Image (cartoon, grey):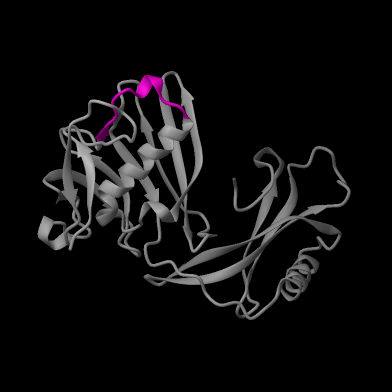
Amino acid sequence: MSRCSLLDRRGVAVAGLAGVLLFGVCDSPLAAEGVVVGAPRVTLNGQALDVTWDEITNAPLTVSAVGSDLLVVKGIEGMGRGEIQDIGTLLVKKYWQLLRVRPEHLVLRKAEKSAGSWFVSYRQTVRGVAVYDTSLGFSIDPEGRVRSLGAILYPDARVAVSRLDREQALKIARGKLRDTDESDHEVSAESVAIYPERRAGAVEYHRAYIFNFFARKETHPGSVVNGRAVFVDGRTGRILKTQPLFKPLGCCLPGD
């Protein structure tokens, strides 16, 4: 049995809003809807969409409706951050067959209002673990229209098993700092994330310890580079990535 969501005639359902006429839109296989992965224009639920694709993951990078909007939100002028978060959930529910990531795997990062428009972004998670460098974002204009969305998603992301504990990973990270003459740095923040390593047309997923190091004492007040993030594979101990941390960008990785 397919699962259905409720949408209004213009493409959106908002919980708690009265007087909205609803109809059912049910999940169905992409093939039945005429969606061809990689095609610049696809049809989903009878709606024509322009799509750009990630050539490795086959996930959409941008989606926009042809001659219409992805969603139209009624009563946008009276909504707050919590209700806007619900709009994002409904947007993903409507297009999850294309995005291949369900709403429960997206965590709100930002919902800000400027000049009457809302700007909303999410991060992907798997079993509560953030997937590094992922996002799904869209804007809602003052008339309540969502014209397009942009995304960096990994539908096949999974949580790998760690063989190293935190102390073992930290020792490896400190060893890397010695190689870069940053052994005086100390940990200011840390996290665990799924790190998608892109290589030769495929993605390998690592459970990574991410340590954010900053110098105990700045040697040059005018320096803009005073920290480093080190990513350690929790299974093999391999250094997956290092990245300078810049003062203007603050601390730390993954970003809030």
Residue 222, by quadrant, is top right
Instruction: Determine the residue positioned at 18% across, 31% down.
Output: 21
Residue 171, by quadrant, is bottom right
Q: Is-magenta flag for residue 78?
A: yes
Report the quarter where the C terminus lies.
Answer: top right
Task: Using the image, determine if residue 75 lies above or below residue 230.
Answer: above
Instruction: Determine the residue positioned at 50% across, 70% down.
Output: 159
- Of 86 and 244, nearer the camera is 86
Horizontal side of 98 relative to 192 (left or right) equals: left
Instruction: Determine the residue positioned at 37% across, 62% down.
Output: 155
Task: Using the image, determine if residue 226 lies above or below residue 222.
Answer: below
Residue 234 on image: x %, y % = 62, 74
Horizontal side of 185 relative to 107 (left or right) equals: right
Residue 17, by quadrant, is top left
Numbered marks: total:
0
Task: Using the image, determine if residue 174 lies above or below residue 49.
Answer: below
Q: Is-magenta flag for residue 75?
A: yes
Residue 31 on image: x %, y % = 13, 62
Report the quarter where the N terminus lies.
Answer: bottom left
Residues rendered magenta in the picture: 71-80
Residue 151 on image: x %, y % = 38, 48
- Of 184 and 190, nearer the camera is 190
Horizontal side of 156 relative to 247 (left or right) equals: left
Residue 238 on image: x %, y % = 63, 76
Task: Using the image, determine if residue 184 lies above or below residue 74.
Answer: below
Instruction: Determine the residue positioned at 85% across, 43% down.
Output: 220
